[in-house]
Image: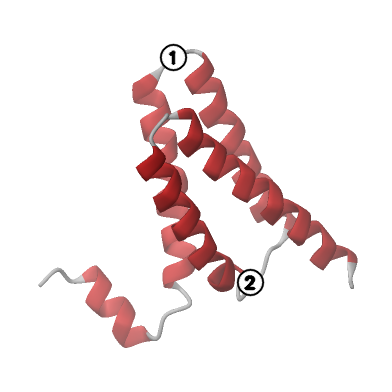
């Protein structure tokens, strides 16, 4: 196994713990179940994309900023940071779809 693959696998384990832990911290069993399900589904998709170290580092930076905002009880900032993080992931994953599917996503019915 290459070093980059091992690094990504460690990153993904940590990423899963972060996202599911965030849901657990919210104290909502439904949110934990939904996050666990979504993260499980995303694992297969994420395995298909390149994981350059700078992208993983950016994601980790976003996670750290989210935690910092939550610790400061700055809800509006935490929401903004989570939205940015989610939109970035959405953009990356949408790039895996065929062009026609991307057009359908971008054009509301």
Q: Quadrant of the N terminus?
A: bottom right
Instruction: State whether residue 106 is above or below residue 61.
Output: below
Residue 62 in view (yes/no) = no
- Measure the alpha-carbon separation of dots 2 and 1: 34 Å
- Circle 1 sits on which residue? 73
Q: In which quarter of the image is the C terminus?
A: bottom left
Q: Please tell me how crowded label 2 is: few (under 14), some (14-19), or many (20+) other residues with Cα within 10 Å.
A: few
Q: Which comes sooner in the sequence, label 2 or label 1?
A: 2
Residue furthest to the left: 109
- Circle 2 sits on which residue? 47
Q: Please tell me how crowded label 1 is: few (under 14), some (14-19), or many (20+) other residues with Cα within 10 Å.
A: few
Instruction: State whether residue 75 is above or below residue 43.
Output: above
Residue occupying image coordinates x 43% and y 62%: 91
Residue occupying image coordinates x 49% and y 67%: 41
Q: Is mark 2 on a helix, strand or loop?
A: loop
Q: Nearer the viewer, residue 18 or 95?
A: 18
Position of 48 with respect to 77 (left or right) is right
Residue occupying image coordinates x 48% and y 77%: 96
């Amino acid at each position: 196994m290459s070093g980059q693959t091992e690094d990504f696998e460690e990153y993904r384990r940590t990423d899963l713990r972060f996202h599911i832990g965030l849901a657990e911290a919210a104290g909502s069993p439904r949110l934990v179940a939904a996050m666990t399900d979504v993260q499980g589904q995303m694992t297969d998709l994420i395995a298909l994309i390149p994981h350059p170290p700078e992208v993983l580092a950016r994601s980790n930076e976003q996670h750290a900023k989210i935690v910092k905002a939550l610790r400061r009880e700055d809800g509006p900032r935490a929401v903004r940071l989570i939205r940015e993080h989610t939109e970035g992931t959405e953009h990356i994953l949408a790039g895996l779809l065929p062009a026609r599917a991307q057009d359908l996503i971008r054009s509301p019915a």
